[in-house]
Amino acid sequence: MIYLELFWSFFQIGLFSIGGGYAAMPLIEHQVVDAHPWLTMTQFADIMTIAEMTPGPIAINSATFVGIQVAGLPGAIIATLGCILPSCTIVMILAYIYYRFRSLTIVQGVLAGLRPAVVAMIASAGISLIILSFYGQKSLPADLHDINYISVLIWGAGLFLLRKWKVNPIHVMAGAGACGILLYSIMPA
């Protein structure tokens, strides 16, 4: 019975957590702390911290960790499957619809209309990250002179390396991290 409850709880989380792992956290908390008292609030906070630190999506990591805490390895597998089944099903249905009707003019029109929106969303996320890095907050401050010059220097050097010599982005990220450790230890921002 516990396996069915785990599966159903994480199926609901996977189905209704639109917006990513952070949007799923209240749903997970409700299911594992309130609806089914599988964990205490302290245990939930610990599991969410571990889920954030480990590679992979937070919702899937938390499903795995809660499942293993509640019902061992079979519980981890069942909770994880419950969490990913809704999104896999929806993607498979959309892929089928796309491949079936991709030659229709209306489908091509919808996809052409979505491209600029996707580019805008990616650009928005990039600009937000740059502002956060340069100014230490999510939005531009009133005083634009409070800029973190070390961040600007590292960003500019990385951009220069990427554009001028087409260096592997992984190497640029590793170098930027090393430069950040070195520069911030010498000159705190």
Image (spheres, rainbow, N blue to C red):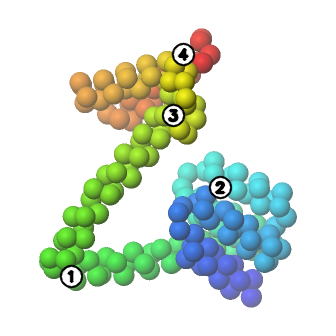
Q: Residue at x 45, y 22 (%)?
A: 152
Name the front one of labels 2 and 3.
Answer: 3
The residue pinned by badge 3 equals: 140
Q: Quadrant of residue 51?
A: bottom right
Distance from Cα at disc 4 to Cα at disc 1: 54 Å
Q: Alpha-carbon distance for marks 4 and 3?
A: 24 Å
Which residue does the image show at 54% across and 24% down from the upper left? 143
Q: CA distance from mark 1 to mark 2?
A: 39 Å
Could you tell which of marks 4 and 1 lies nearer the N-terminus?
Answer: 1
From the viewer's perspective, is 40 left or right of 8?
right
Query: What kind of element bears circle 1?
Result: helix
> From the viewer's perspective, is the residue at label 2 or at label 4 nearer?
4
- Seen in the picture, residue 132 relative to 98 is either above or below; the reply is above
Residue 150 visible in the displayed image: no
Q: Amino acid at mark 2?
A: Ala
For label 2, the residue is 51
Q: CA distance from mark 2 to mark 4?
A: 30 Å
Q: Residue furthest bottom?
A: 1
Q: Nearer the viewer, mark 1 or mark 3?
A: 3
| Kind of element beneath mark 4 | helix
The numbered mark, 2 or 3, whose residue comes first in the sequence reads 2
Q: SS at mark 2?
A: helix
* Residue that numbered label 4 is attached to: 183
Q: Earlier in the sequence, mark 2 or mark 4?
A: 2
| Left or right of residue 126, residue 5 in this image | right
For mark 1, does the 10 Å Cα neighbourhood hold few (<14), some (14 to 19), or many (20 or more) residues? few
Q: Which residue is mark 1?
A: 101
